Image (cartoon, coloured by chain):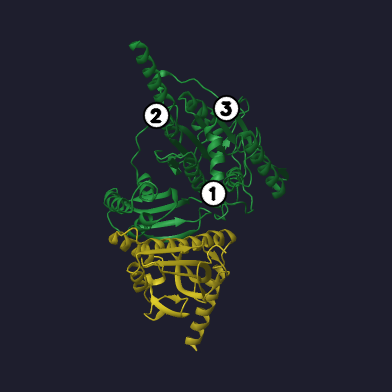
């Protein structure tokens, strides 16, 4: 009976906390802008890491580390306070327009692959990220998700006159969560989750 | 013949040194009565919004060597600090000075000035303000202008009423937040032209003679802040968004005045059975030319070293290589921070919502690999007893 009462009190407290979590319009605007900024920052890092003209390996590693900071759990599994896996390690999908195959990578191995791609010249070009869905509560306290769309152009040149060119629609899943300090300060953070491929086409469709 | 060539060379050299485009410095000063029971929270919000406005202006005029804003809040918001700050202001004729006061204001019955007197914060441990500590806002402008800056903007975000007792000045209404969108390049050019195309001063206060300057309810800090600050920022946001291209201050301040007046009218402010409105007052004193003493010739000023300037430098992807930015970030970490887990909070467009909370190590890496950072404002900086920074609250400004 006591246990039941405690459960009811706990549930009520959670409902109150969730009710207080309602974002104001100004908060939403500030957070949405940050969501776009985070995804744009990642795609810019990606362009730099892939760039063969700049061969500064050490600097590329800094961009890889800065990219990892943008992902939930720094690209690893996230755990709750009881040690259970809360969010699995995020994955990024890579597509091949010719074989129409899709492969999923963990973030760090993916970025290492991008860094060491066997092309003499690589161009990644990303459109500006734009939010395609509203912030949805995940059901966990103070946590929301949303998705963004980015059009990505990839050009790989092996130097033998043959170029691999594809254009991919990518969807970025983003987590928005907050922490509360003892003095009531709410701190939001925006982190990228899974990145999925919507469709991929041979050739440059970037400006169409 | 030889002397003629020499004369021409000297003349050319003189012209180069006096008329060369030298980056102006922006000296920003804010006094805010953040301790006040009634309007303190609102004054703090306005303080942060004005700090961001200073950064916007410095960015718009492409100033890369401006000193950190001088900010006096709480008990530091007092007359002796104001006089000391004004006296110690060492500026050259190419500099820009912006002064803001956010707090209580009033006027004596025989005051001739159209502007109010600054009613400084209650001294520590005292229940009442000391009228001897009040200071005419107009004097602030006069002292600054005696130092001959190229442009001076003075803002008094306070009452201008004749009542000897200070009013509550509250109204429960949310309003516009600060600057909320990333500025367009065109918008920044408009701000630059407003500041750089004329010489002289612009002075603005929240209300005309005899009127109160209202603010928002202090129980809702999200929306607290002075009417003037919100509306001035709102108009400037329009400028930044380039939704409206102002070519002169008269046009811009006229819109600020009507935005504030209309808002106060719509808000229906009633106190003791009387309905109030608020009409900002301004004076513009600008000209196309000015005189500069020979001793005050315009010379480039060396960059000033400060944490803010150093952080901006790390984020500079235009003039530094990636390696230089990384190396600089390591130096900055050692120079200012004892621990690499010092907390950094970054606020969003509304200047309130914390949208990123991270360690200084991670933040410096972000800055060093970031693109398009134009400028940043340190809204709060906390240091330990040894002078090491352990907390920063930052507002970032990005290029389009």
Residue labelled with disc 1 = B183
B347 in relation to B233, above or below? below
Residue B298: where, in percent of width, then height? 41, 26
Q: Nearer the viewer, mark 1 or mark 3?
A: 1
Q: Residue at 68%, 45% (x, y): give it.
A: B264
Chain hosting mark 3: B
How many neighbours does mark 1 have within 10 angstroms: few (below 14), some (14-19), or many (20 or more)? many
Q: Earlier in the sequence, mark 3 or mark 2?
A: 2
Labels 1, 3: one chain: yes
Q: Earlier in the sequence, mark 1 or mark 2?
A: 2
Q: Which chain is green?
A: B
Chain hosting mark 2: B
Labels 3, 2: one chain: yes
Chain A's colour is yellow
As helix, strand or loop, the secondary structure at mark 1 comes to loop
As helix, strand or loop, the secondary structure at mark 2 comes to loop
A31 in relation to B122, above or below? below
B287 in relation to A34, above or below? above
Q: Is residue B143 left or right of residue B284?
A: left
C-beta proximity under 8 Å, tags 3 and 2:
no
- Label annotation for residue B90: 2
Total labels: the figure holds: 3
Q: Is residue B263 left or right of residue A85?
A: right
Residue A125: where, in percent of width, then height? 46, 62
Screen quadrant of the C terminus of chain A: bottom right
Q: Earlier in the sequence, mark 1 or mark 3?
A: 1
């Amino acid at each position: 009976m006591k246990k039941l009462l405690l459960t009811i009190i706990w549930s009520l407290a959670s409902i109150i906390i969730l009710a207080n979590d309602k974002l104001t319009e100004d908060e939403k605007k500030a957070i949405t802008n940050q969501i776009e900024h985070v995804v744009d920052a990642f795609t810019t890092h990606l362009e730099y890491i892939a760039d063969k003209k700049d061969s500064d390996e050490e600097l590329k590693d800094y961009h890889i580390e800065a990219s990892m900071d943008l992902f939930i759990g720094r690209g690893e599994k996230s755990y709750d306070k009881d040690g259970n896996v809360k969010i699995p390690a995020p994955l990024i999908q890579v597509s091949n327009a010719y074989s129409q195959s899709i492969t999923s990578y963990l973030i760090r191995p993916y970025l290492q692959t991008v860094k060491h791609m066997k092309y003499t010249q690589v161009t990644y070009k990303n459109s500006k990220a734009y939010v395609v869905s509203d912030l949805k509560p995940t059901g966990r306290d103070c946590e929301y998700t949303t998705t963004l769309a980015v059009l990505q152009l990839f050009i790989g040149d092996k130097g033998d006159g043959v170029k691999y060119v594809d254009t991919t629609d990518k969807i970025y899943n983003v987590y928005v969560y907050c922490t509360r300090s003892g003095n009531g300060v709410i701190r939001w953070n925006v982190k990228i989750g899974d990145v999925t491929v919507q469709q991929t086409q041979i050739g440059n469709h970037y400006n169409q | 013949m030889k002397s003629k060539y020499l004369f021409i060379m000297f003349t050319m050299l003189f012209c180069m040194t006096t008329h060369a485009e030298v980056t102006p410095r922006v000296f920003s000063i804010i006094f805010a009565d953040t301790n006040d029971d009634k309007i303190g929270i609102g004054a703090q919000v306005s303080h942060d919004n004005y700090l961001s406005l200073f950064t916007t202006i410095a960015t718009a005029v492409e100033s890369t060597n401006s000193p950190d804003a001088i900010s006096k809040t709480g008990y530091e918001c007092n007359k002796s600090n104001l006089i000391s700050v004004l006296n110690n202001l060492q500026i050259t004729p190419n500099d820009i000075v912006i002064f803001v006061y956010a707090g209580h204001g009033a006027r004596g019955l025989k005051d001739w000035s159209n502007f109010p007197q600054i009613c400084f914060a209650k001294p520590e441990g005292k229940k009442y303000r000391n009228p001897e500590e009040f200071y005419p806002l107009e004097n602030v402008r006069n002292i600054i202008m005696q130092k001959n800056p190229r442009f001076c903007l003075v803002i008094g975000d306070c009452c201008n009423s004749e009542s000897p007792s200070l009013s509550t000045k509250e109204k429960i209404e949310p309003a516009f937040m600060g600057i909320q969108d990333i500025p367009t390049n065109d918008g920044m050019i408009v701000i630059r032209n407003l500041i750089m195309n004329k010489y002289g001063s612009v002075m603005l206060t929240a209300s005309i003679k005899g009127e109160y300057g209202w603010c928002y309810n202090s129980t809702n800090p999200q929306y607290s802040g002075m009417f003037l600050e919100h509306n001035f920022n709102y108009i400037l946001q329009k400028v930044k968004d380039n939704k409206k291209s102002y070519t002169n201050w008269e046009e811009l301040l006229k819109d600020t005045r009507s935005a504030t007046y209309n808002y106060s009218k719509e808000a229906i402010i009633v106190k003791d059975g009387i309905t109030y409105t608020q009409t900002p007052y301004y004076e513009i004193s600008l000209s196309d030319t000015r005189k500069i003493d020979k001793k005050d010739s315009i010379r480039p000023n060396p960059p000033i070293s400060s944490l803010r300037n150093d952080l901006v430098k790390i984020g500079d992807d235009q003039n530094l290589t990636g390696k230089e930015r990384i190396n600089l970030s390591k130096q900055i970490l050692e120079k200012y921070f004892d621990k690499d887990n010092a907390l950094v909070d970054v606020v969003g467009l509304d200047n309130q919502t914390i949208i990123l909370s991270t360690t200084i190590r991670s933040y410096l890496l972000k800055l060093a690999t970031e693109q398009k950072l134009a400028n940043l404002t340190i809204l709060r900086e906390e240091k330990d007893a040894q002078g090491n920074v352990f907390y920063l609250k930052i507002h970032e400004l990005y290029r389009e």
